[in-house]
Amino acid sequence: MFSLDRHATTPLTEQVEQGLRALIEGGRLPPGARLMSIRQLARQLGVSANTVVAAYDRLTAAGLIDARGTAGYFVCRPADASEAPAALAAGEAQEGVWLVQQAKDQPPACCWPAAGRCRRPGWRTPCP
């Protein structure tokens, strides 16, 4: 696999991301390969599960790996060169962790019809 340098100035999350990125780009993890679970990799590297989650989120945002629900994380097929500029222009290069944190910091939505919760009069049940 790869090892971490705990005395380096580079954060552990970034080291995990760089290590996995090197394995993927070097072909040691081929497209379609299943990555270790978050807990397994955290235990093997001796880091927090949150560190691995952040690294996986960054790799997902970069389009190198894909989360498939409870099945785990898998290495993506290489993207076509013509797709990369469009993805960056659409803002898909945003860090997944940052996006989730921003969403949690926002006030609740004004209307969630699917959940039966709406704040607007005339809509289903108002929010408590």
Image (tube, rainbow, N blue to C red):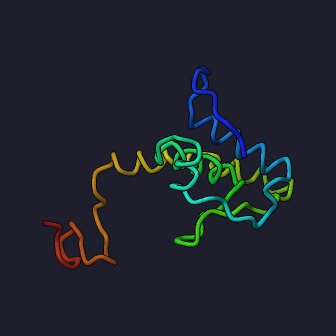
57 or 34: nearer the eye? Answer: 34
Q: Is residue 75 left or right of residue 61?
A: right
Question: Above or below — where is 2 with respect to 104?
Answer: above
* Residue sitting at x 59%, y 66%: 72
Q: Position of residue 21 (x, y in %)?
A: 73, 45
**Residue 65 falls in image quadrant:** bottom right
In front here: 47 or 87? Answer: 47
Tell whether 82 sits left or right of 56.
Answer: right
Residue 111 lies, in percent from the top left, at 29, 67
Query: Which quadrant of the rendered structure holds the C terminus?
Result: bottom left
Query: Is 116 or 98 nearer to us in this picture?
Result: 98
Seen at 57% across and 33% down, the residue is 12
Residue found 70% across the figure and 54% down from its top = 63
In percent of width and height, residue 122 lies at: 19, 77
**Which of the two residues, 82 or 6, is positioned nearer the viewer here?**
6
User: Would you place residue 7 above or below residue 122 in this image?
Assistant: above
- The residue positioned 28% from the left and 57% from the top of the image is 108
Q: Tell whether 84 sits left or right of 91.
A: right
Q: Is residue 25 left or right of residue 42?
A: right
Residue 118: image location, x then y, percent? 24, 70
Compared with 108, 58 (above or below) is above
